[in-house]
Every structure is written in structure tokens, then in C-alpha cells.
Amino acid sequence: MSASQVVVEAPGAHRVEEHTPREPGPGEALVAVHAVGICGSDREVYQGNRPEGYVRYPLTPGHEWSGTVRAVGAGVPASLVGRKVVGEGFRNCQVCDRCHAGETTLCTDGYEETGFTQPGAMAATLTLPARLLHALPDDADLTAAALLEPAACIAAAALKGNARPGERVAVVGTGTLGMFAVQFLRAISPDELLVVGTRNDREALSRSFGATDFRTRDQELPDDFDVVIETAGSASAARTAASLLRRGGRLVLTGIPAAGADGLDPTDLVVRQLEVHTVFGAPPDAWAHTVRVFAAGLLDPLPLVTHELPLTEFPHAIELVGAGDPKVGKVLLRP
């Protein structure tokens, strides 16, 4: 099939069918998809355990993607045609008070997101509001750029943590998000950059991205860091992250653990005057920051990609993502 798309009809049931591009309407752009990443939430969509209201079947998944603009609708600058782009997923209303504040992931108009409630990028083309696009440099590597969506979520965490040059910073978690956190923090020239994980085999990669120290949770851990970004989402990750901070330190939580996880001790938070932030998704300023850092050569997603498969291999890709195999990093589908 020359142009195809994945459709998840219902949990556990999918088909790969012929794809017909949808012409862009006013304010929209048609993008030829280069690559689309798979993450745990795509697995949730396929297995049927995504929370109610956060998925609508039948669905073409795919919210982490890169591509090239092929056509634009009325009211969209013609100069976008031919540009390499990535795009935000949240379909915010633009008129509520949160949207006006730039906090589009907190839009009060309800949840709509590419690849979950709106058609996603596991298809030859994607048509979406052009205002969600972020243009890349002409020489950008589109395979690497397919990872900029998860990077943008971590950029939001880095901006909230507000680490300054010369501060001591740490990352808890060594998955894709953790490795992005290392790169964003490295870019601000910290005095020290510690990575805490559960797998020793991530030490070399962490150091290649700029970590100055690597420890597993069963080793002795310091307690005097200025900023900690948590990306692990395990039951004890938030507590581990908080324990690394000096009094008055800044903590940013991004992981979503299963029910029953260890909570932070409110007495400890108050007595130590810790500043706690959380991140879910990426607002426009975080996207712009990500594209800028990527364009400057300070963000290198490519070493995180371990598999590139055709769309027809969708079920195999989902399997890979959930297998827990340390040799599996980021899995991309190539329409």
C-alpha cells in the first residue's frame, strides 16, 4: 500500500488501511509524516487502559511525530509549505483564561489531543491547526525531531525548575525522558549533574549526555542539590528525588506512578521549605524552547532511537515498548 494508516478500532483490535489525505481547511496545514514515536500512552490506547475521556475510538494514534508541510489552508502563511515541522498535541481553545496565560495544557474547555481523541500521525499525512506547528531548521534531522514531543514535556520541567549556571542539579530516572532532562540541564552549565537510576547499563549514556556522576538508588545519595527533575514515575521516585534536595531546593515531578505510590511528607516539605512543581504535557513556550535548543545542537535525540519499523509492524512495535527489554529504547514507525 503506497499510503497507509493504522486504525485502532477498539482495545486490542487494529487494522492497517489505505490512507486518504484530508485537505487543509482554513487555519490548517497538511503535513507529510516522516516518523512517529511510540510511548507508553500509545500502548494504553491499544490495550484499552487509558483513562476514560482521554481516548476516542476508532482512532489513528501517534502524538510524537515529525514531517514536512505539503499544503496549507486559507489564512495560513504560504511560506510554511516545504518547511520541516513538529507539532503540539493539545488542541486548546485559545480563549479561556488559562490559554490566554499561555498555559494551554490547562485549557478549561476539556481535553482534545492529536493521537488520542483526534487523528494522529500513524499515517502518511496529518492535517491539523497550523498554529500548533513549530518550524525546524532546513537541515534538521527529521528522525531525531520525531522525539521532540517528549523532549518538550521535559523542557517544561526544566523551565519550571529554573536551574541557573553553576547550580548543582540532578535527574531521577534514566529512560528517554531522563536522558532529555540530562541534556536540558547540561545546557545551563551546572556545577554538578547527578543521575540516579536503577540500571547500571545507563551510566555510559548518561555521562555521554553530560552527567558528572551516576548512582543507583541503593548507593549512598547526597542531600544538597539545588534542583531535581524526576522522570521515573516509580512508586518511590518522588521521595528519592525530594531527599536529594538542600533546604529550599526545587523539585519538578513529571512521572505518573500507579496508585499507591509513596507520597511526599508534608512536614518535610514545610520544614525544609521545598518548592515543588509538576508537569503534564508541554505548553507553547516549552515547545519553542525545545526547538531552539535542538536547532542549536544542544539536544541529541538520535542515540535514544533503537528501532525503526514500517506502519505494518504496529503490533510488534507496541510489544517492544512494553517488553521491558533494556536493549529497547525509542521505537519509531516510518509511514
Image: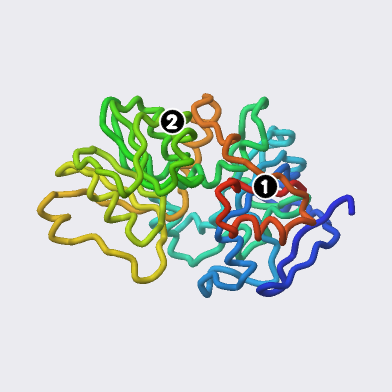
Residue 60 placement, left or right of 40: right
Can residue 131 be seen by looking at this rendering?
no
Describe the element under mark 2 as helix, strand or loop.
Answer: helix
Give the mark toward the camera: 2 or 1: 2
Q: Can you say which quadrant of the picture contains the N terminus?
A: bottom right
* Position of residue 305 measured from the top left corner of the image (x, y, whole percent): 62, 41
**Which residue corresponds to the image point at 74% horizontal and 46% vertical from the top-left?**
334
Q: Where residue 304 appears, x then y in whole percent?
A: 57, 39
152 left or right of 62 in image: left
Q: Amino acid at mark 2?
A: Arg
Q: Which amino acid type is marked by label 1?
A: Leu
Residue 31 screen position, x and y as percent: 72, 45
Q: How many marks?
A: 2
Q: Nearer the viewer, residue 209 or 60?
A: 209
Task: Determine the residue positioned at 55% across, 56% down.
Answer: 324
Which callout, 2 or 1, points at the residue further toward the start of the chain? 2
Secondary structure under tag 1 reads strand
Q: Which label belongs to residue 320?
A: none
| Residue at mark 2 | 207
> How many residues crowd mark 2 within 10 Å: few (<14), some (14–19), many (20+)?
some
Compared across the picture, whether 218 is left or right of 74 comes to left
Vertical comparison of 286 with 10: above or below: above
User: How far apart, in angstroms, are the residues tagged by discs 2 and 1?
Assistant: 24 Å
Residue 217: percent from the left, percent from the top? 32, 48
Task: Tell me where residue 225 sits by quadrant.
Answer: top left
> Residue drawn 44% across and 36% down?
203
Q: Nearer the viewer, residue 146 or 168?
A: 168
Residue 207, picture quadrant: top left
Q: Which residue was labeled with disc 1? A: 332
Position of residue 290 in the picture relative to residue 321 (left or right): left
User: Is the Cβ of the residue at disc 2 closer than 8 Å to that at disc 1?
Assistant: no
For residue 174, what is the image quadrant?
Answer: top left
